[in-house]
Image (tube, grey):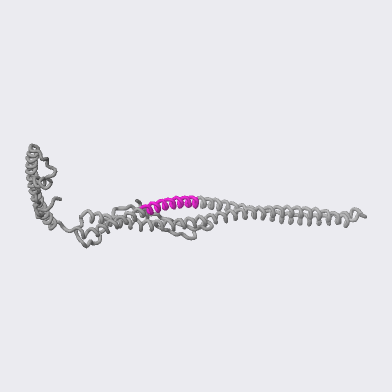
């Protein structure tokens, strides 16, 4: 910047005087001295004009500086003082950066929770399919158990028939034995009258012993056959009952495990949904705060004391209602039933 107009005026030094002080450099020749004198005079005049112009320019520069200073002072009086908002804007920018970082982390966490919820939903569907398959197997086993019970009833009926047949055979054998004994006694009296000298007691004892052996043999064979059939049927029935009991126990343990897994998945899903709702509310609050901070930075809010942001109208969301019914079935009958209703926000 040029020097101010209040500076002391410069004293122009004459080239002639300088030449007089350093006259040792001036040639003593007449012609040369005259030319140099003329040149020095010309240069002195030019220097005087230059110095006058410099002085004039310095004066104009000082006037311009004074006018610029006055203009700046007038403008500074009209321009509001924004320095008090610098710290507020700095703090708001820091809060916005922190909020953006937190919003980003929340968005990532929401996405992770959404993926986790999708995985839990797939697991729940898989467990539900397994549960349905186990229910079908249990129903099939119940039908097989009913068939086995019917077979056991039929076998018991057949066993009763065999017992009744054995009893009937015993009665018939007894009746035939009595008839034979009676016939032999009648024949003995006739033969005694007709033929003399025959030992009827010996003949009767022989016949009696023979029939007793036959009856005993038949009775033993029938008893052995009966015991064999009963033993085989009981062994078959016991084996079938053990096998079905093992299968039923295995299926019941699988069912209990599936129900436990399903209950755990439902609890985790409910927890994830609650956490998702909380994170969604926090995200909406942060978005409203960010919008307010942007308005403050852009100069839309002129107040020093900023009120709390008014909540924006909530955007319409769709709710999906999931009803979970858990039934405990024992021997084909529903023992307990629990119904749960869950509401999930659809994005």
Q: Quadrant of residue 152?
A: bottom right
Q: What's the magenta region?
A: 107-132
Q: Quadrant of residue 37?
A: top left
Residue 342: x %, y % from top left: 39, 57
- Between 160 and 65, the one nearer to me in the picture: 65
Residue 344 in the figure: left or right of residue 185: left
Residue 115 within the magenta-colored segment of the rendering: yes
Q: So how many labels did they put on this image?
A: 0
Q: Residue at x 51, y 52 (%)?
A: 135
Q: Residue at x 23, y 62 (%)?
A: 307
- Between 167 and 106, the one nearer to me in the picture: 106
Residue 317: x %, y % from top left: 32, 53
Toward the right, the furthest residue is 197
Magenta-colored segment: predominant secondary structure: helix
Q: Does any portion of residue 43 appear in the rendered image? A: yes
Residue 75: x %, y % from top left: 12, 55
- Between 332 and 94, the one nearer to me in the picture: 94
Q: Residue at x 79, y 53 (%)?
A: 217
- Between 77 and 15, the one nearer to me in the picture: 15
Residue 218 within the magenta-colored segment of the rendering: no
């Amino acid at each position: 910047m040029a020097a101010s107009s209040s500076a002391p005026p410069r004293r122009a030094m004459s080239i002639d005087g300088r030449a007089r002080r350093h006259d040792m450099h001036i040639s003593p020749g007449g012609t040369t001295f005259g030319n140099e004198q003329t040149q020095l005079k010309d240069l002195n005049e030019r220097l005087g004009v230059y110095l006058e112009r410099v002085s004039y320019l310095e004066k104009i520069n000082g006037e311009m500086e004074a006018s610029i200073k006055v203009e700046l002072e007038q403008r500074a009086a009209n321009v509001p003082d924004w320095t008090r908002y610098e710290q507020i804007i700095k703090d708001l920018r820091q809060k916005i950066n922190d909020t953006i970082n937190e919003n980003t982390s929340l968005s990532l966490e929401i996405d992770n929770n959404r993926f986790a919820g999708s995985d839990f939903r797939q697991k729940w569907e898989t467990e539900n399919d397994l549960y349905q398959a186990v229910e079908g197997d249990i129903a099939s086993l119940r039908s097989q158990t009913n068939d086995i019970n019917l077979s056991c009833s039929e076998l018991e009926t057949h066993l009763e028939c065999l017992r009744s047949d054995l009893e009937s055979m015993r009665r018939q054998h007894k009746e035939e034995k009595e008839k034979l004994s009676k016939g032999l006694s009648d024949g003995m009296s006739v033969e005694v009258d007709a033929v003399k000298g025959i030992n009827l007691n010996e003949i009767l004892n022989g016949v009696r012993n023979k029939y007793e052996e036959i009856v005993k043999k038949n009775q033993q064979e029938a008893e052995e056959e009966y015991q064999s059939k009963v033993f085989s049927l009981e062994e078959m029935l016991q084996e079938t009952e053990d096998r079905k009991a093992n299968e039923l126990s295995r299926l019941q343990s699988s069912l209990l495990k599936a129900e436990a897994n399903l209950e755990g998945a439902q609890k985790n899903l409910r927890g994830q949904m609650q956490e998702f709702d909380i994170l969604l509310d926090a995200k909406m609050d942060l978005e409203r705060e960010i919008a307010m901070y942007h308005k403050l930075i852009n100069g839309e809010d002129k107040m020093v004391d900023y009120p709390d942001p008014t909540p924006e109208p909530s955007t319409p969301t769709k709710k999906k209602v999931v009803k979970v019914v858990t039934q405990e079935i024992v021997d084909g009958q529903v023992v307990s039933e629990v119904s749960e209703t869950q509401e999930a926000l659809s994005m």
